[in-house]
Amino acid sequence: MPRIFLSPPHLTGREAELVAEAIASNWIAPLGPQVDAFERELATVAGVEHAVALSSGTAALHLALVVLGIGAGDEVACSDLTFAASANAVAYTGATPFFVDCDAATWTIDPELLERAITERRAAGANVRALVAVDLYGQCCDYDAVRDVCARHDVVLVQDAAESLGATYRGAPAGGQGLLAAFSFNGNKIITTSGGGMLVSEDRDLVEHARKLSTQAREPAAHYEHLEVGFNYRMSNVLAALGRAQLESLPERVATRRRIRDRYRELLADAPGITFMPEADYGTGNAWLTCIVVDAGGFGADREAIRLALEAEDIEARPLWKPMHLQPIYGSHVTFGGDVSGRLFERGLCLPSGTALTDADQDRVAATVLACRGSRVPG
Ligand SMILES: Cc1ncc(COP(=O)(O)O)c(C=O)c1O
């Protein structure tokens, strides 16, 4: 039986057509009509005015911080429960990230703890400039509360929307909640360009500055003239064609991921000790990955026993993100809280959630999980 991957790319058929168009037009450069169109289309989907297509979500986060003028001597608050790219982008600028735990009810940054964290860092003399708030596994942060805290403390909100394309917050598409937002089109995301990202904002100047920086900060001159340090971060026209084809089916992709999540709920409904990532009532998540939490005592096996049993069946499942405060590289950084994210990491598992997952595949995953009951309870 073929391996079941966690979240593999899912092609719809239109990709080859649009990529062929890009090739036939000879626009194989990191610019061209597909890039322009992808930016317009993605901006529309995200409900924002301006967008610049980049080589990765990490590049988008990095440029967001660069155009905000963040650098050495600054501090940036960051969600603790996230992929390392959120914090790495801060580190690239020379600024120092500090970490804020999540709320158990949403798994996204805890606004009350954020308030305390910024207050305490400021009192300690830190120059807190920005927040990187992460929309975890396709669920937006509670942005009304988060924005209030940021406004009170004059901290700029950067939305790490790498995982939340197609989700909504209070009826608005994910991506317009921060001053700037970053999307990822990495191979495992809800749409993919194999590798790629997009920086979006309502602020034209910030996006235009990022656009300039993304192609080595060339000044408008016939020769190569540079006033600032630039980057080679632009998206290829060929990959933008891939992204456009993928974006066409975003609503169906969100519906499918949500259906997969709901079906796992049904299939595992009788398993005591297994709970699902909660869905906040302020929005609709894209259910990028279905995440469960395993109470080993209640279920009769721990998270790792389940993961290994799935692996033995050639099924890929992954622990939740290891929180930043537990990462050797960021362990010495200031962290507020950490128990919620730490407990989730210990007990949480992401199940195969790709849009091409068949019911039969999913039945196999669920049966393997259920067969673990009683197999291993940690002493
Ligand atoms: C929360 C989060 N932030 C940032 C990134 C970075 O995106 P990319 O892999 O496109 O650089 C990812 C995904 O990879 C992510 O999950």
Image: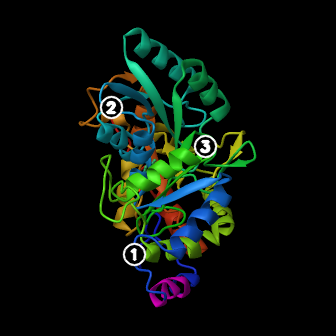
Instruction: Residue at 36%, 26% (x, y): give it.
Output: 74
Residue position marked by numbered label 3 in the rendering: 140
The outermost residue toward the front is: 222
Mark sitting on residue 95: 2
Question: For the C terminus, which image quadrant?
Answer: top left
Task: Give the image location of residue 28, x and y in percent.
Answer: 40, 79
Determine the secondary structure under disc 3: loop
Task: Give the image location of residue 294, x and y in percent.
Answer: 48, 43
Q: Which of the marked residues, 1 or 2, is nearer the chain's N terminus?
A: 1
Residue position marked by numbered label 1 in the rendering: 29
Q: Is residue 320 visible?
A: no
Q: Is residue 225 left or right of residue 371?
A: left
Task: Give the image location of residue 90, x and y in percent.
Answer: 36, 38
**Circle 1/circle 3 CB separation < 8 Å:** no
Binning the other alpha carbons within 10 Å of mark 1 as few (below 14), some (14 to 19) or many (20 upward) gives: some
> Which image quadrant is residue 325 in?
top left
Q: Please give the range of residues in magenta.
A: 17-24
How far apart are the two marked residues, 3 and 2, measured between alpha carbons? 25 Å
